[in-house]
Amino acid sequence: MTGARSLTALVVDDEFLARQRIQDLLEGAERIGRVLTADSGRAAVRAIAEHEPDLMFLDMQMPGMSGLDVVREIGPAGMPVTIFVTAHDQYAVEAFEVAALDYLLKPFEDERFRRALERAIDQAELAEVGDAASRLVQLLDGGAARPRNAMAPPGRIAVESAGTTHVVAIDDITHVTAAGPYSELHTDRRSYLIRDSMQNLERRLAPDGFFRVHRSSIVRLDRVQSVERASGGDYSVRLAGGAELSVSRARIGELELRLGVER
């Protein structure tokens, strides 16, 4: 992006090799102008206060002060865009996905890192991390995270983008796809990126005739034109409008039941 401000990244991990790998991956990355490191939660707090980094890779489990302790110490409003790094997959998937923040599960591949970094840069540009971090603390403290669109009128979902709020009618939504820590609402006219989890949207849309066919896809059942099976045993659905989406093998039976397909 021509003329865009370069960003400062902070890498926090008590293990030297883990810090070094992320630092190496960040070196030369587009939009990253400076890479700082910290070897503890306490050092991370000092670095955030002193340098005000734009984004941070934060290890969840460190001696003395965990990654979550860092969030509590700094406060949601003062946190940079944060990608959590963890070796505990169940905790990461259930907590961070619901909270709409990204995470890297050790050991992670370079491509997975690249996607996380791209999303972090986008989020830093939107300057929306404060609310997401607050929801993370609330979730892990046992509170219920309230979706940002909870106050939208019945039958509609509010989507905020670049200072503009779009109100999307649920009747206009054809399907929903995962987009990292975000979700994407698709209509016949355009798509909308929303800071809400697939789990929340699945619960909200189910009464309106939607069904989650895959971890990363929710479809409106009356838009399904065909269910297709590939030679390898994988399934997909084709929607009116041409979109084709994968179907999990664990969900194909219920999908066909919902569609009235006899096997």
Image (cartoon, grey):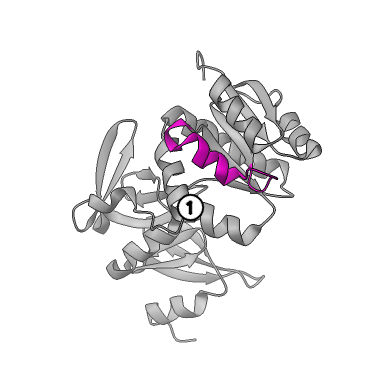
- Picture layout, residue 171 above or below residue 34: below
Identify the residue at image location x=70%, y=38%: 13
Farthest top residue in view? 3
Name the secondary structure under disc 1: strand
In the image, farthest residue toward the bottom = 262
Task: Examine the structure image and report whether residue 73 is included in the region drawn in magenta.
Answer: yes
Is residue 242 in sight in this rendering?
A: no
Q: Where are the magenta residues, as a range?
A: 59-78
> Based on the displayed image, in which of its 4 quarters is residue 66 positioned?
top right
Q: Which residue is drawn at the image coordinates 70% and 45% (left, top)?
A: 63
User: Residue pushed farthest right?
Assistant: 17
Say which amino acid is labelled 1. Ala
- Mark 1 lies on residue: 178
Task: Give the mark count.
Answer: 1
Q: Is residue 35 magenta?
A: no
Residue 147 seen from this side: yes
The picture places residue 225, in percent across and down from the top left corner, at 39, 67
Q: Residue at x 44, y 69 (%)?
A: 226
| Viewer-nearest residue: 163 or 2 | 163
CA neighbours of label 1 inside 10 A, class few (<14), some (14 to 19), many (20+): some
Is residue 8 left or right of 138 when viewed as pictured? Answer: right
The residue at the point 76 percent across, 39 percent down is: 18
x, y percent for residue 39: 72, 34
